[in-house]
Each structure stands twice: as structure tokens, then as C-alpha cells.
Image (spheres, rainbow, N blue to C red):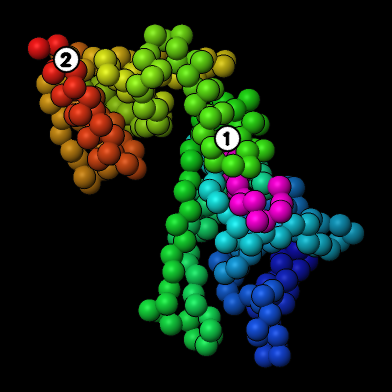
Amino acid sequence: MIKNQIINICNSLLAVPQIRILEKESHYRIDGILYDKDKNLLMIITDRYIIKYKYEINTFIIENKILIAHIDYITLTRDHNYMILHLVEEANQDNLAIANKNLHRVVGCLCSTFFYDKHDYTYPKDRMVERKTPVILVNQKMTDLIHTLKTATEFCHYRDEFNDFLSVRLKRLKIDIDNYVYTCINYRIVKEEAIFIQADFVLDLHAIYIVEFIKDKFETLFTLYLKNIKGMKTIKSSHSFIIYDSVFPEGFEIKLNNYLAVQALIASNVQVYNSLTV
């Protein structure tokens, strides 16, 4: 029964009479469907909208409707189980937060689909516009930070809250909070481990810190001092690079999406460190 109702909803969204073809509410494509049978949560992504439904009295009723063009950026927890859609002021709506499994598929759907200039409704390929929506990954253990970010209405406030949260906790590790870069990585010790392990990465002008967030504080797992780095090797096939130093002569491998940028930052900081110690 539920499946048939979802099919009927999708068919009704796509059944646009010719007389309504110029209306803004028209839908031309279904890009994604998220249904959680335990919560009776239904979310349908069209080429224009995200439509959230609630289940009442054996039927689905529209609870919320968001114009995709109003999504400013997206927060996604690293376990992919919580997502916040941050909306522009023009939307006049609260940010939408969803808790579910495998939400990276929803985020990927929103970021990889595209708009068309539909002035003649032929979907011409030369008028295709890709969606460029920033996605910010957050450690799912940072529950207080996530709760604060959920209500962020402007990115400047979002950035300040994020930086303040990190700086207070990183300062306890004696990291240079005026000159650091923080991101999420996957790492492995080349000699010992075959699989990658997820962790937080911090780089300042002194060292690389691989840290873990436990009970509202960071704990250091590994410290790679810039002065001991002998070289680095890029592994394009795995989106990673290997750092060679005196502690890890066979290599400490770091994997992440923007691996080239992080590798370049490390190389730059090593150069700065060496220039200051000459």
C-alpha cells in the first residue's frame, strides 16, 4: 500500500497538464526518493524541489517544500546519518535537518543533478547548469556543535561558531590556533595497516596532528613533526599521499577528497618551517 502511494505521488508530480506548463510549481523530473519505513518519512527530490511528506491517517501529506535553488550549503555528518540543508534568507524558511541512514546518497543526488533552461521545455544540453553546492563534513561526535550549526542562518556565523568550537579544544593540545588547518581524513600506517581509519587532521606551522574527538575533547593519536618529514608521494589512484619521516620511514598514508590541496599545504608549511629555522 505504501509503495503504491509513493508511485501515485510521483506520477501526480510528473503529470503536468499543458495548461499549467508555465507555472513555477511544475515538476519535470524525479531525481531521488528517500523513504524510511520505521519513521514513515518520505522525501522526494524533483528537478526544482525537495518535498517532505508526513504520514497521517493512512496517507502522505506534504509537511515541507524547499526550492533547491534556495539551498546555500549542506552540513553532513561523517557517518552520513545526519544532514542539514542551510537555506538562503530569501527562502523565509528554517533550515531542514534530516536524520537517516546513507544520507550521502541524498547529498550526492542534490549536488550531482542539474538545472535546465526550460524556456522551450526540450532540455537542451547546451543550456544545462550544474548545481555547485558546498558540502561541509562534521564529526558526528560533535553533537553540541551540530546543534548550534543547525540554526545557522548566515555562513559567517556558521564559520565563527565552527572555528570557536575547534579553537577552544585545539588550544588544549598546544596547537597554534592562529595558524592551523582542520579537516577530516582517512589514514593508515603503510607498514602495519591495510585498511584506512577515519580521524581528524590538524596542521599548523610546527607539526601534523592526527587526533580523535572523544567526550568533548581532542586526543592526539599521532604527531608528525614538519622538521622530520623527508618527502611525500602522491597516489592519484586512491586520492591519497604518503608522508615519509623518521617515525614512519615506510610511510604514513593520508586519504581524502582534496588530497592534493592538503599535500600542497603540508609542503608549503615544511618550506616555511625550514626557512624560519635556517
The stretch of residues the image draws in magenta is 81-94
Residue 155: give x, y in percent of width and height.
Answer: 54, 41
Few, some or many residues within 10 Å of mark 2 (<14, 14–19, 20+): few
Type of amino acid at the residue the image marks with label 1? His
Q: Quadrant of the N terminus?
A: bottom right
Q: Position of residue 128 (x, y in %)?
A: 43, 73
How packed is label 1: few (under 14 Cα within 10 Å), some, or many (20 or more)? few
- For the point 50% across and 77% down, the residue is 117
Amino acid type, label 2: Leu
Where the C terminus falls, by quadrant? top left
Picture quadrant of residue 203: top left
Which mark is drawn over residue 276?
2
Quick check: 163 above or below 240?
above
Ranked by sequence position, the earlier of labels 2 and 1 is 1
The residue that mark 1 highlights is 157
**Magenta region includes residue 108:** no
- Left or right: 239 as drawn, with respect to 167: left
Q: Please indicate, yes or no, whether residue 271 appears anywhere in the rendered image.
A: yes
Q: Nearer the viewer, residue 182 or 4?
A: 182
State the SS at label 2: helix
